[in-house]
Amino acid sequence: MNQSKPPLVVVAAALVDGQGRVFVQQRPHDKAMGGLWEFPGGKVEPDETPEVALIRELREELTIETETACLAPASFATGMIGERPLLLLLYVCRKWQGVVQPTEAPDSRWLHTNQLFALDMPPADAPLVAMLDALL
Amino acid sequence: MNQSKPPLVVVAAALVDGQGRVFVQQRPHDKAMGGLWEFPGGKVEPDETPEVALIRELREELTIETETACLAPASFATGMIGERPLLLLLYVCRKWQGVVQPTEAPDSRWLHTNQLFALDMPPADAPLVAMLDALL
């Protein structure tokens, strides 16, 4: 396999509430993999560390504020998007300020980890669910 | 923080034997962070996926053969090496061919995860021990 291009690094958060439930949201129907369920997050831009990117994405997508100290590395997944290698980093976050209010997602849910297995998720997200179920 | 350079991706393996012990090795004394203990692995080269790089490193460092299907993503850590962002990916591997024979390390051990906490490890490796202890 050839990856002359550097990997596309994507960060995502498993927000965990006081009842141990995890937040998931549905991708907009007009986007790639529309309608599938995913953890909030997005691409790391060239001028960002992974944590800075995730803090920005959570602000943009959910109107909440968190900080690097509240982002605990949980697991990761690798894959390919076309010919470009993908690296998906999943953090657990239990502490944030504000109320989780999705700005783009058509639907969202707080679910216990054993309920996540039943969701249709993008290929890179799915293997992270088993890891999360073991960790939380 | 500025990361105009793409992240340096380093892969490492927690090899787990039939008794649930994990392999660690000591860094050569003439290298950076010499004498510290670490999981085997190394840098992902531009033409490699993370898994291909780890298979190569395990062959070079330990004379064993494994395959992508035997490498389970476990956790990750982020950091900085000077001004370059570092991304360390840790896989669990329970299946390989050959006998683990360190080719460079001055010392090596098979330890239970709760014994790993006492080791002097590089900054990026240390936080992975707690995760491993929770997973295994």
Image: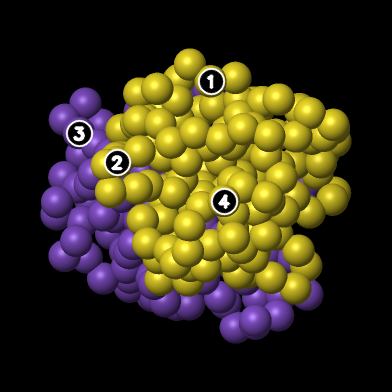
Chain colours: A purple, B yellow
- Residue B106 % position (x, y): 68, 34
- Dots 2, 4 in contact, CB < 8 A: no
Task: Name the element at disc 1.
Answer: loop
Q: Name which quarter of the figure residue B50 lies in.
A: bottom right
Badge 3 amino acid: Gly
Badge 2 amino acid: Gly
Q: Name which quarter of the figure residue B37 lies in.
A: top right
Q: Is residue B109 above or below residue A115?
A: above
Disc 3 versus disc 2: nearer the observer: 2
**Residue placed under numbered mark 2 in the picture:** B20
Disc 1 versus disc 4: nearer the observer: 4
- Dots 1, 4 in contact, CB < 8 A: no
Task: Name the element at disc 3.
Answer: loop
**Residue placed under numbered mark 4 in the picture:** B101
Badge 1 amino acid: Leu
Disc 2 versus disc 4: nearer the observer: 4
Same chain? Circles 2 and 4: yes
